[in-house]
Image (cartoon, rainbow, N blue to C red):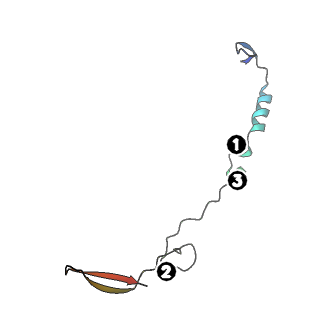
């Protein structure tokens, strides 16, 4: 195998590396996980969350608790509005 030398790129000279030198170079530049293939050799591994859990509307703690639930109004009042032209409209108002 010949590699370019000089500025023109047209001049070549034989590459004189032994297999041992190539292996040493490759092994020194690879990380442990690339050599072993083991997940345990991986640096900065992500934290894998636990399995998903179904939400529970009535839960007051734990992973199934729904946070920031809206308050559902239970009290209602109806208002009858009469307009100047004699038409009416009933409006239901919800209060907590």
For residue 17, side relative to residue 70 (left or right): right
What kind of element bears circle 3?
A: loop
Name the mark on residue 58: 2
The residue lying furthest to the left in this view is 86
Query: Which residue is label 3 attached to?
Result: 44
Query: Which residue is label 1 attached to?
Result: 34
Instruction: First in sequence, mark 3 or 1: give its number.
Output: 1
- Residue 84 place in picture, x, y as percent: 22, 80
Residue that appears at 38% across and 82% down: 94
For residue 57, side relative to residue 35 (left or right): left
The answer to whether the residue labelled 1 contacts the one labelled 2, judged by CB atoms less than 8 Å apart, is no
Residue that appears at 31% across and 86% down: 78
Q: Nearer the viewer, residue 6 or 89?
A: 89
The answer to whether the residue labelled 3 contacts the one labelled 1, judged by CB atoms less than 8 Å apart, is no
The residue lying furthest to the top in this view is 11
* Category of crowding for the residue at label 1, using alpha-carbon neighbours closer than 10 angstroms: few (below 14), some (14–19), many (at least 20): few
- Residue 13 place in picture, x, y as percent: 76, 15
């Amino acid at each position: 195998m010949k590699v370019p030398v000089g500025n023109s790129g047209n001049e070549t000279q034989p590459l004189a590396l032994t297999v041992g030198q190539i292996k040493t170079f490759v092994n020194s530049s690879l990380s442990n996980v690339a050599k072993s293939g083991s997940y345990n050799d991986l640096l900065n591994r992500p934290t894998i969350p636990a399995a998903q859990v179904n939400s529970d509307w009535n839960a007051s703690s734990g992973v199934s608790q729904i946070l920031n639930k809206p308050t559902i109004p239970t009290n209602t009042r109806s208002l009858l509005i009469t307009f100047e032209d004699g038409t009416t409209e009933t409006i239901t108002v919800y209060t907590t």
